[in-house]
Each structure stands twice: as structure tokens, then as C-alpha cells.
Amino acid sequence: MCGRTVLSLNKNDLRHACSYKPKGCKSYKKPDWSDEHNDGKTYSPSHNIAPTDVTPVLVSSSQFRSDSENERILKPMMWGIIPPWHTGDYKKHNLSTNNCRLENIKSSKLYGPALHKGGRCVVVMEGFYEWQTTDKSTKTKQPYYIYAPQKDSTKVDDPETWSTDYDEETGWKGINLLYLAAIYSVWKHEDVIIYSYSVITMDSNSTLDWLHHRMPAVLDTPEQIEAWLDVDNVNPDLALTYLKAVKMLCWHPVSTAVNNSRYKSEDCNNRVTVTKPKSSQKSLTAFFTKVEKRKSTETDSSEIKRRKNNAN
């Protein structure tokens, strides 16, 4: 599952971070940026991005600009697909569409048509938050920050350790991003046009099943990203075979302050120490131990009194 994300890079650094090597090219190329439509809403860097916020996603330029010399475009889209059949206020379709299940994607009335029309995109982020649902010992679910493995000197929760260096020969030197497979759609009503997306999820593997039974479809190799974006040469069925449960992920616990989507401070993804609640079984055992000790003490006192009476 994926319910909140983090992307704090500015537009220019993000283009550098998403640079890639086109086939047959020796140098890195930055994707173009397209800021059209979306009812005036655009990308704003944030440490606590929630559904209905607008974030940049990678798409094939062939779906937008047939004359573009660049293969990829970074286009801000709203998180949570708006059903094409919805009319009126696009914020009030009353469906939860921030995630779509891989198992049902082809047969879905909402996601199937988008998939077959070439609506494949890649959501870029520094990481995402997930709440532990497998621990039933506490009423408050503990949130964790999930992210890609980093270079030794880079700490994901300390931007002071990040490099922003980039050149066309060697590419981006900064933080390693996460790339999530997603489906996007275009919603039109009167004069309003909204591009929106849903993150694809699958059953968790041994990497994250201790945390949650679902996980997003992470694209962790350039080949996977290329195949998912290449809607002209890779058909939907083949593209879906590239979606595998990734094993190489890192995480750490964060403050429950991120539970509030309006809380967007830079400390949202900072590492915290989690204190395990005391076991109720241990408390129960301690209670009976105290009872046994009290009974033993009462018995000893009674025996002393009895001996004194016999002596008299």
C-alpha cells in the first residue's frame, strides 16, 4: 500500500535526479517539464504528500509531444485517478483511487481502459510512509519511512548530506529516488482538464510483509523504468511482467505526527526511537506473583501466632 509520499527536491534538481541515458547515447539527458492543465494546481515540494496533492510523474513524450526530441517528460499530476465518467466537482467522486491492485488492473472498469490506452507513468519520490498493521499490541499504528538504499555518506532525513551535483557525462550524484509504477488518466469536464494517477500495489514479499500485507510496485532498474514507459513498443501484458516485488529497500520509524496530512514539516521523515509497550501478559504474571507472595506472608504470620498461643 502507499498512502503518503515525500518529494522535497525543487524542479531543477528533480530533472537532474531523473536524468537517464537514451538507447545508443553516451551522455545523460534530463526529461522535459510540462506544467499544463490540472486546474492551476502544480507541484510543491513536501515532506508529507497526500492523495489529491499534485506531484511530478515520468511519462513517455510520445503521449504528449510527438515532435519532442526528448523521450521522457516530467508532468505534475494529481494523486488519485478521477473516474472518466464522473461529472461536476472532480474532488467529490467519493472513490479511493490513490492505489490500484495489480491483480485486478486489467479487468477493472476504471484502471483497465487507462492501461490499454497507454496510460503508464512512473511516480518519482524520495520515499513513502507506511503504517504497521501487523502489530496488534498497540492501538496507534507506528509509521515507517521507506526509501531506496543510499550512498554511505547520504542520509535520507538530513538534506545537509545530499549532493546536488550533476553533469551529462556521469549523471546525478544526489539522493537515490524511488520509482513507482502507476496508471494515469485524463479527466475533462467543460473547460477543466485534470491529469491524475494511481500507484500500483501488489502482495508484500519478505522485505515488507512484517509491516503491511501490500506494497507498491517499485521499479528498481533502468530496464524496468524503460519498459514501463515505452508504451509504443511494449504492450500492456508484457509491461506488467516487469512489475516484481522489490527486495532492496530501507526504512526507519518516524513520528506519528505524519498521521496528520496537514503536518508537512521537514522533520516528518526524521528517524525516531520506538519504545515497545509493556506486555500485558508480563503484567498479569507479575500480579499473580504478588498475590502468591502475599499469601505466603499471611501463612507465615498465622503460623507464628499459632506457635505463640501454644507456648502460652
Image (cartoon, grey):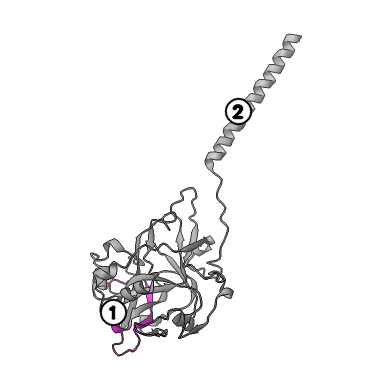
Q: Is residue 145 above or below residue 63?
A: above
Q: Residue at x 44, y 64 (%)?
A: 248
Instruction: Point out residue 87 in the picture as x, y percentages from the top left corner.
Output: 28, 74
Q: Residue at x 56, y 35 (%)?
A: 285
Marks 1 & 2, CB-CB < 8 Å contact = no
Indicate the quadrant where residue 289 lies: top right
Q: Residue furthest right?
A: 312
Of residues 177 and 43, the one drawn nearer to the viewer in this rendering: 177
What element does badge 2 sit on? helix
The N terminus: image quadrant = bottom left
The three-letter amino acid code for the residue at tag 1 is: His
Is most of the magenta stretch helix, strand or loop? loop
- Whichever of callouts 1 and 2 sits on the residue coming sooner in the sequence is 1
Instruction: Point out residue 38 in the picture as x, y percentages from the top left corner.
Output: 36, 80
Q: Where is mark 2, residue-wise?
A: 292
The three-letter amino acid code for the residue at tag 2 is: Glu
Q: Is residue 144 above or below residue 298?
A: below
* Chain part drawn in magenta: 61-90
Q: Is residue 37 above or below residue 153?
A: below
Judge from the rendering whether residue 294 lies leftward or rightward of residue 163; answer left or right. right
Q: Where is mark 1, residue-wise?
A: 189
What element does badge 1 sit on? strand
Residue 171 counted in the magenta span = no
- Per the model, the C-alpha gap separating discs 1 and 2 is 74 Å
Instruction: Point out residue 134 in the picture as x, y percentages from the top left corner.
Output: 43, 52
Indicate the quadrant where residue 27 lies: bottom left
Judge from the rendering whether residue 235 lies leftward or rightward of residue 4; answer left or right. left
